Amino acid sequence: MKQSRWREKSWKFWREWAKPLLTILLITGAFRSAIADWNDVPTGSMKPTILEGDRIFVNKLAYDLKIPFTTVHLTSWGHPKRGDIIVFFSPTDGVRLVKRVVGLPGDQIELHDNQVLVNGKQATYRPLDEQISNQIRAEERLSHRFAAEEIEQGSHPVMSTPQLSALRSFPPLTVPPDSYFVMGDNRDNSKDSRYIGCIPRGTIVGRAKAVVLSVDPGNHYFPRWGRFFSALP
Protein backbone atom coordinates (compact mmCIF):
# COMPACT_ATOMS: atom_id res chain seq x y z
CA MET A 1 0.00 0.00 0.00
CA LYS A 2 2.76 2.43 0.97
CA GLN A 3 4.74 1.49 -2.15
CA SER A 4 1.69 2.14 -4.32
CA ARG A 5 1.22 5.59 -2.80
CA TRP A 6 4.92 6.37 -3.26
CA ARG A 7 4.71 5.42 -6.94
CA GLU A 8 1.59 7.54 -7.37
CA LYS A 9 3.24 10.57 -5.78
CA SER A 10 6.40 10.05 -7.82
CA TRP A 11 4.43 9.84 -11.05
CA LYS A 12 2.44 12.95 -10.12
CA PHE A 13 5.64 14.86 -9.36
CA TRP A 14 7.12 13.79 -12.71
CA ARG A 15 3.99 14.66 -14.68
CA GLU A 16 3.22 18.00 -13.03
CA TRP A 17 6.67 19.37 -12.19
CA ALA A 18 9.72 17.50 -13.42
CA LYS A 19 8.62 16.80 -17.00
CA PRO A 20 7.45 20.37 -17.79
CA LEU A 21 10.61 21.81 -16.21
CA LEU A 22 12.84 19.45 -18.17
CA THR A 23 11.00 20.31 -21.38
CA ILE A 24 11.50 24.04 -20.77
CA LEU A 25 15.20 23.53 -20.02
CA LEU A 26 15.72 21.47 -23.18
CA ILE A 27 13.92 24.00 -25.39
CA THR A 28 15.79 26.92 -23.81
CA GLY A 29 19.10 25.10 -24.10
CA ALA A 30 18.50 24.19 -27.74
CA PHE A 31 17.54 27.80 -28.53
CA ARG A 32 20.68 29.18 -26.91
CA SER A 33 22.84 26.51 -28.50
CA ALA A 34 21.67 26.89 -32.11
CA ILE A 35 19.82 30.20 -32.52
CA ALA A 36 20.85 32.98 -30.16
CA ASP A 37 22.80 33.39 -26.94
CA TRP A 38 24.59 35.95 -24.84
CA ASN A 39 28.24 36.07 -23.90
CA ASP A 40 29.66 37.70 -20.78
CA VAL A 41 32.92 39.56 -21.42
CA PRO A 42 35.36 39.31 -18.47
CA THR A 43 38.45 40.78 -20.18
CA GLY A 44 39.36 43.96 -22.04
CA SER A 45 40.77 42.44 -25.23
CA MET A 46 38.08 44.15 -27.35
CA LYS A 47 38.24 47.60 -25.74
CA PRO A 48 37.19 50.26 -26.51
CA THR A 49 34.41 48.50 -28.50
CA ILE A 50 33.49 45.99 -25.78
CA LEU A 51 34.23 46.66 -22.11
CA GLU A 52 34.70 44.33 -19.16
CA GLY A 53 31.27 43.67 -17.73
CA ASP A 54 29.42 43.86 -21.04
CA ARG A 55 26.98 41.09 -21.93
CA ILE A 56 26.79 40.79 -25.70
CA PHE A 57 24.10 39.29 -27.92
CA VAL A 58 25.38 36.49 -30.19
CA ASN A 59 23.46 35.68 -33.35
CA LYS A 60 24.18 31.99 -33.95
CA LEU A 61 22.18 32.00 -37.18
CA ALA A 62 24.36 34.71 -38.73
CA TYR A 63 26.24 32.27 -40.94
CA ASP A 64 24.75 28.81 -40.58
CA LEU A 65 22.52 26.36 -38.73
CA LYS A 66 24.06 23.85 -36.34
CA ILE A 67 22.71 20.81 -34.55
CA PRO A 68 21.87 21.98 -31.00
CA PHE A 69 24.55 21.27 -28.38
CA THR A 70 27.14 20.53 -31.10
CA THR A 71 29.32 22.38 -33.62
CA VAL A 72 28.05 20.19 -36.47
CA HIS A 73 26.82 22.36 -39.37
CA LEU A 74 23.54 21.40 -41.00
CA THR A 75 23.63 24.13 -43.62
CA SER A 76 25.37 27.44 -44.29
CA TRP A 77 24.06 30.62 -45.93
CA GLY A 78 26.91 33.02 -45.33
CA HIS A 79 30.44 33.52 -44.09
CA PRO A 80 32.10 36.05 -41.78
CA LYS A 81 32.98 39.35 -43.43
CA ARG A 82 35.92 41.60 -42.69
CA GLY A 83 35.06 43.72 -39.67
CA ASP A 84 32.57 41.24 -38.16
CA ILE A 85 32.93 40.58 -34.44
CA ILE A 86 32.75 36.81 -34.04
CA VAL A 87 32.53 34.38 -31.14
CA PHE A 88 34.53 31.18 -31.57
CA PHE A 89 36.32 28.38 -29.75
CA SER A 90 40.07 28.91 -29.50
CA PRO A 91 41.99 26.31 -31.53
CA THR A 92 44.58 26.07 -28.73
CA ASP A 93 42.49 25.43 -25.61
CA GLY A 94 38.81 25.46 -26.63
CA VAL A 95 38.01 28.62 -24.65
CA ARG A 96 35.25 30.75 -26.16
CA LEU A 97 36.69 34.07 -27.39
CA VAL A 98 35.40 37.28 -28.97
CA LYS A 99 37.50 38.98 -31.68
CA ARG A 100 37.17 40.97 -34.91
CA VAL A 101 37.73 39.47 -38.36
CA VAL A 102 40.66 41.18 -40.10
CA GLY A 103 41.68 38.62 -42.71
CA LEU A 104 39.50 36.40 -44.94
CA PRO A 105 40.52 33.10 -46.56
CA GLY A 106 43.30 33.76 -49.09
CA ASP A 107 44.11 37.27 -47.79
CA GLN A 108 47.68 38.32 -47.16
CA ILE A 109 47.93 39.97 -43.74
CA GLU A 110 50.86 41.84 -42.22
CA LEU A 111 51.40 44.21 -39.33
CA HIS A 112 53.91 47.08 -39.16
CA ASP A 113 54.11 48.90 -35.81
CA ASN A 114 50.44 48.14 -35.10
CA GLN A 115 49.33 49.23 -38.59
CA VAL A 116 47.47 46.52 -40.51
CA LEU A 117 48.08 45.79 -44.18
CA VAL A 118 45.62 43.65 -46.13
CA ASN A 119 46.79 42.39 -49.52
CA GLY A 120 49.49 45.04 -49.54
CA LYS A 121 47.14 47.93 -48.79
CA GLN A 122 47.58 49.71 -45.47
CA ALA A 123 44.61 50.49 -43.27
CA THR A 124 43.72 54.14 -42.68
CA TYR A 125 43.83 55.53 -39.13
CA ARG A 126 41.82 58.57 -38.02
CA PRO A 127 41.04 60.18 -34.65
CA LEU A 128 38.43 58.21 -32.71
CA ASP A 129 35.14 59.78 -31.69
CA GLU A 130 35.56 60.82 -28.05
CA GLN A 131 32.12 59.46 -27.21
CA ILE A 132 33.65 56.00 -27.63
CA SER A 133 36.97 56.50 -25.84
CA ASN A 134 35.30 58.44 -23.00
CA GLN A 135 33.46 55.29 -21.93
CA ILE A 136 36.79 54.17 -20.49
CA ARG A 137 37.73 55.65 -17.12
CA ALA A 138 39.62 58.97 -17.35
CA GLU A 139 42.60 57.73 -15.34
CA GLU A 140 42.88 54.68 -17.61
CA ARG A 141 42.58 56.63 -20.87
CA LEU A 142 45.87 58.40 -20.18
CA SER A 143 47.88 55.23 -20.80
CA HIS A 144 46.22 54.36 -24.14
CA ARG A 145 46.09 55.66 -27.68
CA PHE A 146 42.86 55.49 -29.63
CA ALA A 147 42.04 55.50 -33.34
CA ALA A 148 39.38 54.58 -35.87
CA GLU A 149 40.83 51.89 -38.12
CA GLU A 150 39.43 51.77 -41.65
CA ILE A 151 40.04 48.68 -43.78
CA GLU A 152 38.39 48.88 -47.19
CA GLN A 153 34.92 50.33 -46.48
CA GLY A 154 34.59 49.37 -42.82
CA SER A 155 35.69 51.38 -39.80
CA HIS A 156 35.98 50.35 -36.15
CA PRO A 157 37.70 51.56 -32.94
CA VAL A 158 41.12 50.30 -31.88
CA MET A 159 43.28 50.97 -28.87
CA SER A 160 47.00 50.58 -28.17
CA THR A 161 49.06 50.69 -24.99
CA PRO A 162 52.66 51.75 -25.74
CA GLN A 163 54.06 50.72 -22.34
CA LEU A 164 53.02 47.07 -22.78
CA SER A 165 55.20 44.48 -24.49
CA ALA A 166 53.24 43.17 -27.48
CA LEU A 167 53.62 41.74 -30.98
CA ARG A 168 53.19 44.91 -33.04
CA SER A 169 54.79 43.70 -36.28
CA PHE A 170 54.91 40.49 -38.29
CA PRO A 171 55.79 39.64 -41.92
CA PRO A 172 53.14 38.85 -44.55
CA LEU A 173 51.16 35.66 -43.98
CA THR A 174 48.43 34.13 -46.10
CA VAL A 175 45.19 33.11 -44.40
CA PRO A 176 44.52 29.41 -45.15
CA PRO A 177 41.34 28.27 -46.92
CA ASP A 178 38.24 28.08 -44.72
CA SER A 179 39.99 30.07 -41.97
CA TYR A 180 40.02 33.65 -40.63
CA PHE A 181 42.61 35.97 -39.13
CA VAL A 182 41.17 37.74 -36.09
CA MET A 183 42.44 40.47 -33.78
CA GLY A 184 41.23 42.19 -30.65
CA ASP A 185 40.48 45.90 -30.89
CA ASN A 186 42.71 46.29 -27.84
CA ARG A 187 45.75 45.60 -30.00
CA ASP A 188 48.44 45.38 -27.32
CA ASN A 189 46.45 43.21 -24.91
CA SER A 190 44.68 40.51 -26.92
CA LYS A 191 45.28 36.79 -27.37
CA ASP A 192 44.32 36.60 -31.03
CA SER A 193 45.55 35.13 -34.33
CA ARG A 194 48.99 36.60 -33.74
CA TYR A 195 49.37 34.05 -30.95
CA ILE A 196 46.81 31.27 -31.53
CA GLY A 197 46.84 31.18 -35.33
CA CYS A 198 44.02 31.51 -37.82
CA ILE A 199 40.52 30.45 -36.80
CA PRO A 200 38.95 27.46 -38.61
CA ARG A 201 35.46 28.16 -39.96
CA GLY A 202 34.01 25.21 -38.06
CA THR A 203 34.92 26.68 -34.65
CA ILE A 204 32.91 29.88 -35.17
CA VAL A 205 29.83 30.06 -32.94
CA GLY A 206 28.19 33.19 -34.34
CA ARG A 207 28.37 36.94 -34.74
CA ALA A 208 28.23 39.45 -31.86
CA LYS A 209 25.71 42.14 -32.76
CA ALA A 210 25.03 44.29 -29.70
CA VAL A 211 25.60 44.93 -26.01
CA VAL A 212 22.50 43.71 -24.20
CA LEU A 213 23.45 45.04 -20.78
CA SER A 214 26.58 46.27 -19.04
CA VAL A 215 27.88 46.63 -15.49
CA ASP A 216 31.07 48.29 -14.27
CA PRO A 217 33.24 45.82 -12.28
CA GLY A 218 35.40 48.72 -11.11
CA ASN A 219 32.42 50.58 -9.63
CA HIS A 220 30.59 47.98 -7.53
CA TYR A 221 29.03 46.51 -10.70
CA PHE A 222 26.89 49.60 -11.16
CA PRO A 223 24.92 49.44 -14.44
CA ARG A 224 26.29 51.38 -17.41
CA TRP A 225 22.83 52.41 -18.61
CA GLY A 226 24.13 54.12 -21.73
CA ARG A 227 25.51 50.82 -23.07
CA PHE A 228 22.28 48.84 -22.71
CA PHE A 229 20.96 47.60 -26.09
CA SER A 230 23.68 49.40 -28.04
CA ALA A 231 24.86 48.11 -31.44
CA LEU A 232 28.47 47.04 -31.90
CA PRO A 233 30.45 48.81 -34.66
Image (tube, grey):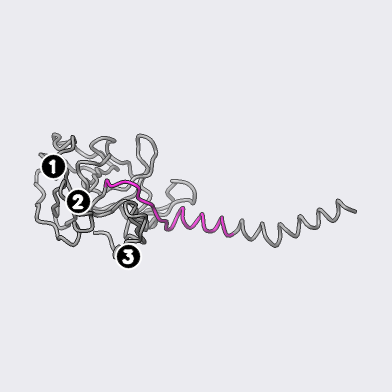
Q: Earlier in the sequence, mark 1 or mark 3?
A: 1
Q: Which residues are magenta?
A: 24-45
Q: Quadrant of the N terminus?
A: bottom right
Q: Quadrant of the C terminus?
A: bottom left
Q: Quadrant of residue 118?
A: top left
- Which of discs 2 and 3 lies nearer the camera? The answer is 2
Disc 1 marks a residue whose amino acid type is Asn
Residue identifier under label 3:
225
Q: Which mark is residue 114?
A: 1
Residue 214 located left or right of residue 148 = right
| Camera-nearest residue between 33 and 227 | 227
Disc 2 marks a residue whose amino acid type is Glu
Q: Residue 64's x, y, as percent?
A: 38, 54
Residue identifier under label 2:
139
Separation (CA) of disc 1 from disc 2: 23 Å
Mark 2 surroundings: few (<14), some (14-19) or many (≥20) residues within 10 A: few
Q: Residue 219's x, y, as percent?
A: 32, 55
